[in-house]
Image: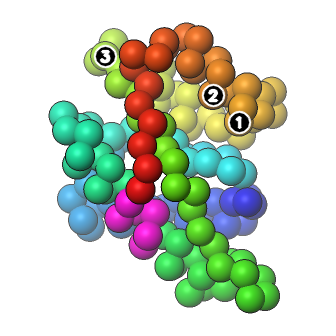
Amino acid sequence: FLYEGLRKKLFPYMREYCAIHGIEHDCLNGHKEHVHCLFKYSSFKDLESNIHSIQSDSAFWINKHGFVSGDNKFRWGWDFIAVSIGQSSVDALRDYIRCQDWVHGRKNFEEEFWLALLTLGRSQLTRGRV
């Protein structure tokens, strides 16, 4: 899990990685078992490639800096979910991403996922594998 101390160091690192590698992102935050990132993309292939790059580099960084104890190695899950939104929803999504500690004080990840599915509909949710 991404415990609080790790999140406080990992998320700024991931933001910096995106900036250095030209991955256009608006905001990034998350909770114990997931990360939310607001990207600007027109191509799913670009999104998938960049998510894989961010995951690979950040997992290496976590393991290199000893955030996982013992012989265990940190690995991200293989699945990700992408949501397509209109410009009118960007501010609300940005606020939602920034307030993940508050959100997860009220809902777990599974409840959050199903709420998004019901709210946005299947047509706007895309699952991917990296």
Q: Position of residue 111 (x, y in %)?
A: 73, 26
How many angstroms separate mark 2 from mark 3 (CA)? 19 Å
Q: Are marks 2 and 1 in contact (CB under 8 Å)?
A: yes
On residue 86, the disc is 3
Amino acid type assigned to the residue bearing label 3 in the image = Gly
Task: Name the mark nearer the viewer: 2 or 3.
Answer: 2
Q: Is residue 53 left or right of residue 14?
A: left
Number of on-image labels: 3
- Judge whether 80 appears above or below 108 on screen: below
Which residues, given as a range, are shown in magenta? Answer: 52-57
- Mark found first going from the N terminus, 2 or 3: 3
Amino acid type assigned to the residue bearing label 2 in the image = Phe
Q: Would residue 92 be seen by someone viewing this image from the given angle?
A: yes
- Judge whether 51 appears above or below 66 on screen: above
Q: Are marks 3 and 1 in contact (CB under 8 Å)?
A: no
Task: Name the mark nearer the viewer: 3 or 1.
Answer: 1
Q: Quick one: 5 or 61, which is closer to the camera?
A: 61
- Mark found first going from the N terminus, 3 or 1: 3
**56 in magenta:** yes
Residue visible at 38% across and 60% down? 52
Q: Quadrant for the N terminus, please.
A: bottom right
How many angstroms separate mark 2 from mark 1 (CA)? 6 Å
Residue visible at 78% across and 88% down? 70
Q: Position of residue 130 (x, y in %)?
A: 41, 56
**Residue marked by disc 1:** 109
Residue visible at 51% across and 78% down? 61
**Residue marked by disc 2:** 113
